[in-house]
């Protein structure tokens, strides 16, 4: 199967769109100038339900929708297109809108960048003691782009040449100096856009380095959704699977961290065969995904997702809530509603699928689990708990926030009982202040699907 990409410049050729209303196509064009837009023939032919495409979650996952932009932003781009503005001006206008869409860019950009001997390692992110995130420079794109993802434009800024050559060596050197790290997580973009040779370059470097402290090598990927042929018929499919086997035989565990938003993604023969082939290499597949309005904001969808994952031998891992998306007002689900959806789905599955945790916010101080609404003397509160934290000591100490059914993120919550701050805040501010920052380090924004 040959990969055929569709983007802003050729999506009108998609056969299934031939009878679509012009207004719809125009909206894709307008919004696609601001938000990422890339899909491919597998998604188009096998995932999207074209009988009902305007409401279809798989269509919305890849195709820009008019409502993803505020009306005034939409109008500005639309009229620039009508005026046939030149490429440069259009890009400038799009960039200015993107800046407005990303409400907290400074929060997440510049932190957690590790160093060796004073040299910044911009392809690494080290936030939680036991896990290092590794961004291989050739893995900074995806087989298709999720419309809720605001990461990819930043990834393209990585200084590839400076970096690619020594990247594997630096990763190994960094791990030698940090014996507390047990997990290395390959992330992106999508590391599975790399061929076997590139993947092997990094994985072999890790294996050869003989680091007994490193137990788990994880690969974060949406390729099972966007291009399962990567494990079936692509020229590199078989050699990649043999590489996976080799990692597992080395005594480390290879964990494939899949990103599945909807059971449809698990329903095709292609995806099921790819999953089976990966599992046959001894690789564990875990699954995590953000909760998104218009895509998967219903308990039934999550129940079916977890049931189907378990049936196919995939371990449900995280449900995330997302704040920092480009089209936030379109996708946002309030924390209380997220918890209701989680709870409703979770209460309908057996213990096999209850490995999943959520809803969880990947916020600055850590991964914050919304445990639920608790009533104390007739008044509701939100009970929260760190699953991961900038200070390991914060983990597993449940804390309370004032009930707020509209809040969608940690920074909108207030400590319960009129307390001035949450227990971790003072220390967090201190960490924050003492950290070196560098506005150039754009690739370190936390990913929605990491
Ligand atoms: C989620 C995440 C990890 C991995 O956390 P686990 O709970 O071990 O899966 C590591 N680093 C960052 C920055 C993360 O957001
Ligand atoms: S959410 Fe993940 S798979 Fe989707 S576009 Fe972003 S990085 Fe790629």
Image (cartoon, rainbow, N blue to C red):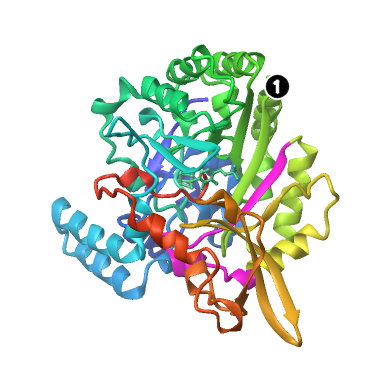
Check disc 1 and report its element: helix, strand or loop: loop
Whether 191 is drawn above or below 172: the answer is below
Whether 46 is drawn above or below 270: the answer is below
- Residue 102 position by quadrant: bottom left
In this picture, residue 260 sits left or right of residue 61: right
- Tell me if residue 245 is in the magenta stretch: no
Q: Which residue is disc 1 drawn over? A: 282
At a point 66% along the width and 14% down the height, the residue shown is 249
Instruction: Work out whether residue 324 can be spotted.
Output: no
Q: Position of residue 242 (x, y in %)?
A: 60, 13
Q: Position of residue 169 (x, y in %)?
A: 38, 19
What are the residue bounds of the magenta stretch?
314-337
- Residue 223 position by quadrant: top right
Callout 1 crowding tier (Cα within 10 Å): few <14, some 14–19, many ≥20: some
In terms of depth relative to the viewer, which is nearer, 41 or 247?
Answer: 247
Instruction: Work out whether residue 300 can be spotted.
Output: yes
In this picture, residue 440 sits left or right of residue 121: left
In terms of depth relative to the viewer, which is nearer, 292 or 10?
Answer: 292
> How many numbered discs, if any?
1
In terms of depth relative to the viewer, which is nearer, 41 or 62?
Answer: 62
Whether 54 is drawn above or below 436: the answer is below
In this picture, residue 69 sits left or right of residue 254: left
- Residue 328 position by quadrant: bottom left
Q: Position of residue 162 (x, y in %)?
A: 24, 27
Whether 111 is drawn above or below 423: the answer is above
């Amino acid at each position: 199967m040959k990969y055929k990409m569709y983007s802003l410049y050729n999506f009108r050729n998609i056969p299934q769109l031939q009878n679509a209303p012009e207004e719809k196509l125009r909206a894709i064009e307008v919004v696609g100038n601001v938000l990422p837009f890339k899909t491919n023939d597998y998604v188009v032919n096998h995932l999207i339900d074209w009988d009902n495409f305007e409401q279809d979650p798989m269509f919305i996952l890849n195709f820009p929708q008019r409502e993803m932009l505020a009306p005034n932003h939409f109008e500005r781009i639309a009229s620039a297109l009508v005026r046939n503005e030149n490429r440069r001006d259009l890009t400038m206008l799009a960039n200015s809108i993107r800046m407005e869409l990303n409400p907290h860019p400074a929060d997440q950009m510049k932190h957690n960048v590790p160093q060796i001997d004073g040299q910044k390692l911009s392809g690494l992110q080290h936030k939680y003691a036991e896990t290092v995130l590794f961004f291989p420079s050739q893995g900074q794109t995806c087989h298709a782009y999720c419309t809720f993802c605001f990461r990819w434009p930043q990834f393209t800024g990585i200084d590839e040449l400076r970096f690619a050559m020594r990247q594997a060596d630096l990763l190994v050197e960094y791990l030698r100096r940090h014996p507390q790290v047990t997990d290395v997580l390959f992330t992106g973009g999508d590391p599975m856009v790399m061929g076997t040779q590139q993947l092997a370059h990094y994985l072999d470097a890790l294996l050869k380095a003989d680091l007994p402290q490193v137990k788990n090598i994880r690969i974060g990927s949406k390729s099972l959704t966007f291009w399962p042929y990567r494990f079936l018929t692509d020229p590199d499919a078989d050699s990649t699977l043999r590489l996976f086997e080799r990692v597992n035989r080395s005594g480390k565990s290879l964990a494939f961290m899949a990103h599945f938003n909807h059971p449809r993604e698990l329903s095709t023969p292609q995806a099921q065969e790819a999953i089976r082939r990966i599992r046959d290499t001894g690789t564990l597949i875990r699954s995590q995904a953000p909760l998104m309005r218009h895509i998967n904001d219903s308990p039934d969808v999550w129940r079916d997702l977890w049931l189907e994952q378990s049936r196919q031998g995939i371990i449900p891992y995280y449900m995330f809530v997302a704040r920092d998306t480009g089209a936030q007002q379109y996708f946002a689900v309030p924390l209380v509603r997220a918890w209701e959806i989680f709870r409703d789905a979770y209460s309908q599955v057996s213990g096999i699928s209850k490995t999943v945790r959520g809803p969880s916010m990947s916020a600055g101080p850590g991964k914050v689990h919304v445990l639920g609404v608790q009533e104390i003397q007739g008044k509701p509160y939100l009970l929260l708990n760190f699953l991961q934290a900038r200070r390991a000591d914060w983990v597993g100490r449940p804390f309370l926030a004032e009930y707020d059914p509209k809040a969608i993120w940690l920074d909108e919550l207030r400590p319960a009982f009129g307390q001035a701050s949450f227990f971790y805040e003072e220390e967090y501010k201190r960490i924050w202040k003492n950290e070196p920052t560098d506005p150039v380090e754009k690739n370190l924004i936390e990913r929605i699907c990491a």
